[in-house]
Image (cartoon, helix red, strand yellow):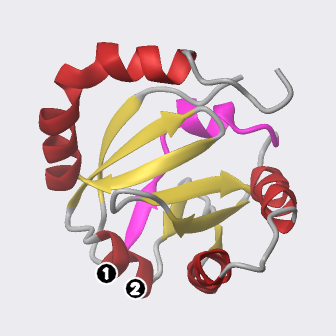
């Protein structure tokens, strides 16, 4: 099942963040206690199940590394990705460097995005919505008109 929904959360003083039940249940692993937290796009963080992260890593392994941009992306992505554990209160601890990378403050927003969860600073998410919501129809047309290789 695809991960969906928007959830307001608080990053506590110990940098812990509670994962809402609908998102926990949406990951493919039942009763998973380990996830992978990685840099996302547009200033967010991406949370993957371990299986989801391994599937992404398999896809990334197929990218030719002859271009410096590809090598730089892989270095930046993997050097900042980290496994995180779910505690008994269903919280993960966000590493300091990833908090800084995403500019997370006290108020955060978690959104389900198909196979992963994005973690946004609330102010950054609100700005993203303000700037992009009016483009939804155009973005829909572009996304649905995309041709996959081999089609």
Would you say residue 16 sits in the magenta stretch?
A: yes
Q: CA distance from mark 2 to mark 1?
A: 6 Å
- Disc 2 is placed on an element classified as helix
Q: What is the crowding at mark 2: few (fewer than 14 residues within 10 Å), some, or many (at least 20)?
A: few
In the figure, residue 133 lies in which quadrant?
A: top left
- Residue name at image x 35 percent, y 36 percent: 7
Q: Is residue 17 visible?
A: yes
Q: What is the crowding at mark 1: few (fewer than 14 residues within 10 Å), some, or many (at least 20)?
A: few
- Disc 1 is placed on an element classified as helix
Image-based side of 145 in relation to 65, left or right: left
Image-based side of 133 in relation to 84, left or right: left
Would you say residue 38 sits in the magenta stretch?
A: no
Image-based side of 53 in relation to 17, left or right: right
Residue 19: x and y in percent read 50, 48
Residue 18: x and y in percent read 45, 53
- Residue name at image x 30 percent, y 19 percent: 136
- Residue name at image x 12 percent, y 35 percent: 130
Residue 87: x and y in percent read 60, 64
- Residue name at image x 37 percent, y 32 percent: 6
For marks 2 and 1, give the one nearer the viewer: 1
Magenta residues?
Answer: 15-29
Q: Is residue 64 above or below residue 111?
A: below
Residue at the disc numbered 2: 96
Q: Quadrant of the N terminus?
A: top right
Q: Quadrant of the C terminus?
A: top right
Residue at the disc numbered 1: 100
Q: Which mark is residue 30?
A: none
Q: Is residue 54 above or below residue 118?
A: below
**Proximity of marks 2 and 1: CB atoms separated by less than 8 Å:** yes
Residue 82: x and y in percent read 63, 77
């Amino acid at each position: 099942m695809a991960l969906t929904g928007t959830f307001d959360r608080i990053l506590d003083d110990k940098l812990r963040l509670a994962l809402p039940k609908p998102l926990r249940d949406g990951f493919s692993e039942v009763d998973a206690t380990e996830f992978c937290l990685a840099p996302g796009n547009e200033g967010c963080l991406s949370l993957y199940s371990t299986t989801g992260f391994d599937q992404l890593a398999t896809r990334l392994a197929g990218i030719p590394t002859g271009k410096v941009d590809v090598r730089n992306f892989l270095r930046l992505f993997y050097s900042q990705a980290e496994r995180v554990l779910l505690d008994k209160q269903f919280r993960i601890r966000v590493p300091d460097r990833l908090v800084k990378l995403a500019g997370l403050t006290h108020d955060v927003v978690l959104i389900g995005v198909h196979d992963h969860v994005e973690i946004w600073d609330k102010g950054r998410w609100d700005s993203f919505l303000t700037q992009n919501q009016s483009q939804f129809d155009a973005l829909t047309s572009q996304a649905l008109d995309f041709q996959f290789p081999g089609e």
